[in-house]
Image (spheres, grey):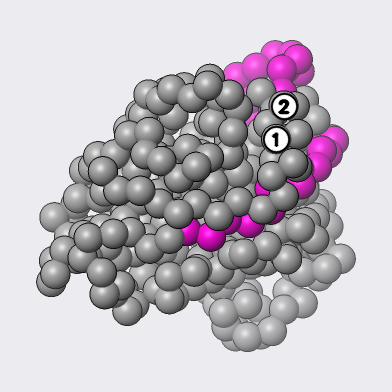
Amino acid sequence: MKRLGFLLVALALVAAACGTSNGGTEPTSTTTIPTPTTTTPSTTSSTTSSSTTSTTQTSVPSVEQYVRVYFLIDEVTDEGGPFVRPVSRQISPTLEVARAAVNELIAGPTPDEQAGTPSVSGGLPEGTQLLGLTIAGDTARIDLSEEIENIGGTFGEMSVLAQLVFTLTQFPTVDEVVLLIEGEQVELFGGHGMEVAPSLNRDWFLGGGLVPEILIDEPGWFGRADNPLLVTGIARAFEATVQWGLYDNDGLPLDEGFTMASAGGPDWGTFQFAIPYTVDSPQLGSLMMWEDSARDGSPINLVEHPVWLTP
């Protein structure tokens, strides 16, 4: 079993929060996973909404609701980035969860997230407004104000589109995203004229430097973990094999193993698995995933995901 040196900050704040919460350079070591560095727990915010999106529910839920908002998160293992990753957000109970998620994307990362290690950045350009959102079939049509294009550089334009598409396609009813600006469907986006018609999907961004080799979709960054913990995502891994470990507040392993993606590199595959775990009290833990290097067995493409564990 591996033992991680898990660095936590503001332990008193963590305890209080628990009480209220329901392809780059490979590491040289061949026997240990790089020590993770955690950031301050993210501050969640709530929002209300007024547009219509498709849903199977007929009344506003009375339980706590969460969505995942795809921001940019820096890497701490010198393997590139920043990459799009899902950050957990609590929202006011609503049927219009897609609109709520986009509003959280517009609001952007919190100051604590921006100052954390690793840093969370991104969001939509300042002043962007959500003018409309409808979902029909497997397609979301989203209308944004002209400020959405107020961003410079190819990377900036690509990252805005990726965050928007990944945030909307977290919902099982959405595979494609059609972009409108001020009511008009867009064919070319931004100053570099990126072709976005007829629609965008997640595959559009794979291999472009914004999606990590291992992307955990669920749970979100600082998300609440059910028990067992359901883990979903995508990976481009040699022979489709991805290692994982779940660690408690002290960095001690709760469980370790591996999962198989639906396809092996150079193709991308999906993965889904569950991890039963036991903890005595609510606490901040870490879900880590990585690939063993085909060259020397050392861990590469390491992902550390902070999660709130519950008894």
Question: As rendered, which of 170 and 79 lies closer to the eye?
Answer: 79
Q: Are marks 2 and 1 in contact (CB under 8 Å)?
A: yes
Q: Residue 99 shows which numbered tag?
A: none
Question: What amino acid type should be assigned to the residue bearing mark 2?
Answer: Gly
Question: What amino acid type should be assigned to the residue bearing mark 1?
Answer: Ala
Residue 171 picture location, percent across and down: 54, 37
Residue visible at 75% across and 34% down? 16
Q: Is residue 173 visible?
A: no
Q: Which residues are magenta?
A: 36-65
Residue picked out by circle 2: 19
Residue visible at 43% across and 22% down? 278
| Left or right: where 63 falls relative to 232 | right
Q: Main secondary structure of the magenta part?
A: loop
Q: Is residue 10 visible?
A: yes
Residue visible at 68% across and 31% down? 18
Q: Secondary structure at mark 1?
A: helix
Residue 99 picture location, percent across and down: 73, 41
Q: What is the quadrant of the N terminus in the image?
A: top left
Q: Secondary structure at mark 2?
A: helix
Residue 66 picture location, percent across and down: 66, 33
